[in-house]
């Protein structure tokens, strides 16, 4: 217990920071944001360095004998190995940080300085004095290449600085600022240690660097996940829309074909025109399944006119249609007007007491919105029933959802039994301008 207590006392900050990184890694083990493997490698190397330093400190406190000659002792060999390991690992950590942070293309070439460092440290173990040497009392003396490990680490830090400038130029401001702070923190520690202001804080600084950047990675990852989730939701809604569009109401097809069959005997030219309109209607519905962008209001109006021409065959003089188009300079999701007009005919006019009525489609422009208004003087309904989202109102729900998801639009419905219905589509002007590229 005393050994553990002394180790923690001497390395408490390092251990706390490393444990903090490990906790973050465990917390994000399922998501595994980009760079997690690099962070794990750095944590392992930091842990080796901390344990390495802890063993040295423990030995100097409890096992060191100032009167003893260590020149041919195994302890001297272990001290050489310990220092060489530390000299190799710190530049290697800087290299892994570089791989973690920057889009390094020539990884093998950049690794060459670390290879030189490793070879030099091995050579120093075989013949002490090239980089460092311990005397018989375990006092460390610098060799001619003592600055080599620090020089290698500095190369990687300078490369990090270079990439941070590139990040800022590419408008990745948060990433560039984060990397600059990490490099500044590390360089400041190197300077303070060289000036004798601090001692043996490099492992703590590196651990802090990793925590800072890992927080950045997690934040970016979560932001990307939100975007991906939103994109997936939109794709799912588009899929639902395509499914809805592909399921053309059987009753409408049956009624239209029955009306066309009737016209074949009564008026061949009208039957031909009706067949052309029916073909246009089917083609528009099929084309709508491949639409991913907004469409001009003029296309929606034309498709609605085709639909109404087919309904007019069935209703005849019982269905009056009025178009009052004053605004045509905007776009909206495909097949949003026609389903609302279909509801006006099917649930408004057809279910009114007289079985006849008028449907009016108009467009107008305000300061904030482009408006599409569909009015009917039919049976009307209680708008509170829309909350139930039963089968008769699923088309309204679908239109409302697509308007909101695809262009930030709204669908406002006003209705009351026996008083008709008014559906208003609101398309925000700023959303329209962004989608139209203005």
Image: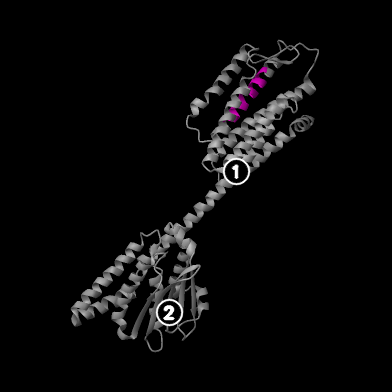
Residue 339 percent coordinates (x, y): 39, 72
Residue 405 seen in this snapshot:
no
Highlighted magenta segment, given as a residue range: 80-95
Q: Under tag 1, what secondary structure?
A: helix
Which is in the foreground here, disc 1 or disc 2?
A: 2
Residue 355 percent coordinates (x, y): 37, 86
Q: Main secondary structure of the magenta part?
A: helix
Residue 187 seen in this snapshot:
yes
Q: Is residue 48 above or below residue 229?
A: above
Q: In this figure, which residue is indicated by the disc labeled 2?
A: 375
Residue 248 percent coordinates (x, y): 34, 69
**Disc on res. 234:** none
Tell me: 173 left or right of 51.
Answer: left
Q: In this figure, which residue is indicated by the disc labeled 1?
A: 216
Label 2 crowd (10 A; few <14 / some 14-19 / many >=20): many
- For the point 32% across and 78% down, the residue is 311
Image quadrant holding the N terminus, namely: top right
Residue 85 lies within the magenta run: yes
Residue 249 percent coordinates (x, y): 35, 72
């Amino acid at each position: 217990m005393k050994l553990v207590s002394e180790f923690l006392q001497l390395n408490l900050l390092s251990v706390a920071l490393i444990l903090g990184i490990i906790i973050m890694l465990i917390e994000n083990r399922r998501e595994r944001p980009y760079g997690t493997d690099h962070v794990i490698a750095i944590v392992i190397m930091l842990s080796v360095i901390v344990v390495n330093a802890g063993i040295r400190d423990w030995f100097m406190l409890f096992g060191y004998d100032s009167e003893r000659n260590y020149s041919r002792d195994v302890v001297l060999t272990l001290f050489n190995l310990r220092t060489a390991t530390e000299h190799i690992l710190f530049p290697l950590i800087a290299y892994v940080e570089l791989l973690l942070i920057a889009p390094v293309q020539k990884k093998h070439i950049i690794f060459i300085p670390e290879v030189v460092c490793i070879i030099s440290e091995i050579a120093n173990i075989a013949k002490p004095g090239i980089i460092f040497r311990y005397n018989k009392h375990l006092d460390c003396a610098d060799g001619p290449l003592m600055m080599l490990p620090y020089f290698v680490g500095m190369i990687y830090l300078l490369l990090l600085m270079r990439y941070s400038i590139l990040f800022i130029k590419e408008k990745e401001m948060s990433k560039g600022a984060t990397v600059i702070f990490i490099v500044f923190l590390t360089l400041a520690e190197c300077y303070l240690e060289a000036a004798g202001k601090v001692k043996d804080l490099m492992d703590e600084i590196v651990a802090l660097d990793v925590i800072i950047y890992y927080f950045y990675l997690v934040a970016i990852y979560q932001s990307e996940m939100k975007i991906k989730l939103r994109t997936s939701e939109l794709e799912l809604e588009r899929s639902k829309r395509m499914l809805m569009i592909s399921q053309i109401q059987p009753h409408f097809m049956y009624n239209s074909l029955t009306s066309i069959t009737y016209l074949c005997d009564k008026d061949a030219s009208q039957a031909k025109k009706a067949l052309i309109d029916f073909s246009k209607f089917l083609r528009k519905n099929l084309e709508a399944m491949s639409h991913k962008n907004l469409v001009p209001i003029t296309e929606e109006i034309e498709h609605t006119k085709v639909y109404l021409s087919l309904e007019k065959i069935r209703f005849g003089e019982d269905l009056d249609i009025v178009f009052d188009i004053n605004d045509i300079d905007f776009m909206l999701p495909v097949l949003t007007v026609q389903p609302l007009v279909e509801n006006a005919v099917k649930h408004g006019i057809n279910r009114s007491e007289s079985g006849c009525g008028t449907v009016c489609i108009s467009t107008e422009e305000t300061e904030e919105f482009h408006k599409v208004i569909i009015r009917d003087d039919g049976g009307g309904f209680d708008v509170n029933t829309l909350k139930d989202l039963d089968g008769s109102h699923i088309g309204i729900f679908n239109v409302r959802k697509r308007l909101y998801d695809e262009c930030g639009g709204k669908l406002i419905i006003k209705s009351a039994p026996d008083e008709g219905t008014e559906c208003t589509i609101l398309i925000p002007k700023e959303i329209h301008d962004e989608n139209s590229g203005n």
